[in-house]
Image (cartoon, rainbow, N blue to C red):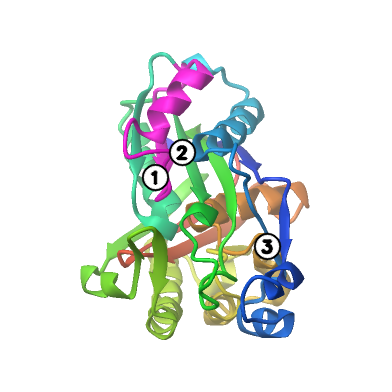
Amino acid sequence: MKNAGFIGIGRYVPEKVLTNADLEKIVDTSDEWIRTRTGIEERRIADDSINTSDMAYEAALNAIKNSGIDAEEIDMILVATVTPDRPFPSVATILQERLGAKRAAAMDISAACAGFMYGVVTAKQFIETGTYDNILVVGVEKLSKITNWEDRNTAVLFGDGAGAAIIGNVSEGRGILSFELGADGTGGKHLFQDGKHIYMNGREVFKFAVRQMGESCINVIEKAGLTKEDVDYLIPHQANIRIMESSRQRLDLPEEKMSKTVHKYGNTSAASIPISLVEELEEGNIKDDDVIVMVGFGGGLTWGALAIKWGK
């Protein structure tokens, strides 16, 4: 069995910044209300000329460059998104053509904010069995196109962006140590796309996320044969600072050991974890052989978590 892990990463966020002050002019809200309840200060918004596949392409190019492989060496492309350019063809197949990844199989994954976790775990199976050598996993969303800008409860939350990773074989003892994926379809009524727009029962989603994120963190640590003391860094889905803090406290981690990008990008759904991963690596906060826990939750309701020992 091979060891599946991250051999390259990349991200892309649109240039346009939408601040809380900007939102005050659009919907009945305030900067203070948004910051105290969510931790969000601004978010990136893609203009009408930028499609989901465009953002995925830019993030993928960066991940491929970072990995040192060529696009033609990619065996599979998995794109996690709930905002594809159109129902079909998939964003993954559009990406395959643009990248020139001629031999890659390609498909989209719809697991909302947990989509990137689902993609990485799917890639893990193909790598560890030796079926494939290099798999591109992208989390990308253009949530601005399904946001109801008249709904103060959801308009303040979401942003656009993309994060990508090349999953391949890494050295012994490194890579993905354990994972958890889950779903509870009975909760789908609390977070879904209603016609053109996102609908969310904030109270119910908050309760679910606080419980499940914490439980999943503990579960993947135990599955990996580790303890909370072994964890060096936490990268939670960047949905709400209060939910994120509950996960950090469950792991007894100091504040500086948790990734926090929600204030800059808001909730970018499937893109939030890989975007945050890239930021922390660029800042030098994650080093080789660090143990990282990634955890996310989303509409479905879905969830996923990974314990990883970083490095190639």
The reply to whether the C-beta atoms of the residues labelled 2 and 1 are less than 8 Å apart is: yes
Residue 48 image position (x, y, % from top left): 58, 42
Give the total of numbered labels.
3
Q: At 49% across and 66% down in the image, what residue appears?
A: 148
* Position of the N terminus by quadrant: top left
Q: At 64% across and 52% down in the image, what residue appears?
A: 45
Judged left or right of residue 93, residue 230 is right
- The local crowd at label 3, few if under 14, some if 14 to 19, many if 20 or more residues have their Cα within 10 Å, is many
Q: Earlier in the sequence, mark 3 or mark 2?
A: 2
According to the picture, the residue beneath numbered tag 3 turns out to be 261
The amino acid beneath tag 1 is: Gly
Compared to 96, does 237 lie above or below?
below
SS category of the residue bearing label 2: strand
Q: Measure the C-alpha gap from mark 3 to mark 2.
A: 20 Å
Give me the disc on residue 72. Answer: none
According to the picture, the residue beneath numbered tag 2 turns out to be 137
Q: At 78% across and 52% down in the image, what residue appears?
A: 283
The amino acid beneath tag 2 is: Val
Q: Earlier in the sequence, mark 2 or mark 1?
A: 1
- Place residue 30 in its image quadrant: bottom right
- Place residue 273 in its image quadrant: bottom right
The amino acid beneath tag 3 is: Thr
| Magenta span | 73-101
Residue 5 image position (x, y, % from top left): 49, 41
